[in-house]
Structures are given as C-alpha cells and as structure tokens.
Image: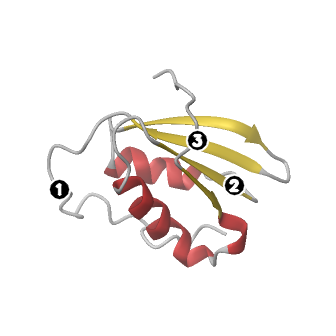
Amino acid sequence: MTATLTQPTHILDLRTIPPRERHPLILGRFGALATGESLQLVNDHNPQPLRHQFEDRAFGQFEWAALEAGPAVWRIQITRIAQSAAPSTGAKGDSCCSGGACCG
C-alpha cells in the first residue's frame, strides 16, 4: 500500500498523554475521520503495536506513513482511505494493546 501524504486533519502529541489513554484516543479520532482525512501522531517510541492494532481493527481502511523514525521522536501519519463496511464486534480486536497498557 503506498501512502499518500495529505495535510493532517489532526495532530496528536502522544508524549503528553498517559500511555493507557493513547490507543483509545487515537482509534476514536481515526473513527471520526472522513475518507481522505489524516491523523498525524508524534510519539516518543516506535508505535508498532498501534500499527498491529490498526491492521486488526481497520484493515483496508488506512494508510500508514512514517514521517520521522526516532530515535527520540516518531511522527506517523495515518490516512483514512475507506470507511468501515460493518461495525467491529471487538472479538478480534481484544489484543493486549486494547487500552494501550503494554505500550509505553
């Protein structure tokens, strides 16, 4: 999947948000995006667990682009490329990162 960089609709600096609140906030903001809108994340670590969670919960609905890859700052742009066909049941999405607790 080739990422198309657009002006982000929202920029979230996750470094100021408690770790357990990050994933629910990001997923909520992504859920509110219209197709073509994007969310830029600023983080203090590689958000790879979040990417796995997106692949699990929003497969085919997003593009992920690393704008800056550490070591001190990571900037990720997530663009909505499609809307969800059906609401998630949550059964598949109950990973260890559901609340972001394992991600620091």
C-alpha span from label 3 to label 2: 9 Å
The residue carrying mark 1 is 87
Relative side of 89 to 40, left or right: left
Residue 86 picture location, percent across and down: 14, 49
Please indicate, yes or no, whether residue 97 appears anywhere in the rendered image.
Answer: no
Residue in the image at 26% along x and 57% along y: 92
Residue 38 picture location, percent across and down: 49, 42
Q: Are marks 3 and 2 in contact (CB under 8 Å)?
A: no
Please indicate, yes or no, whether residue 54 appears anywhere in the rendered image.
Answer: yes
Q: Amino acid at mark 3?
A: Gln
Q: Amino acid at mark 2?
A: Val
Answer with the quarter of the image where residue 11 lies.
bottom right
Vertical side of 39 occupied by 3: above or below: above
Relative side of 104 to 2, left or right: right
Q: Secondary structure at mark 1?
A: loop
Q: Secondary structure at mark 3?
A: strand
C-alpha span from label 3 to label 1: 23 Å
**How many other residues sit within 10 Å of disc 2, few (<14), some (14-19) or many (≥20)?**
many
Q: Secondary structure at mark 2?
A: strand
Residue 12 picture location, percent across and down: 61, 59
Quadrant location of the C terminus in the rendered image: bottom right
The residue carrying mark 2 is 42
Relative side of 15 to 97, left or right: right
Q: Earlier in the sequence, mark 3 or mark 1?
A: 3
The residue carrying mark 3 is 77
Answer with the quarter of the image where residue 49 lies.
bottom right
Answer with the quarter of the image where residue 90 lies.
bottom left
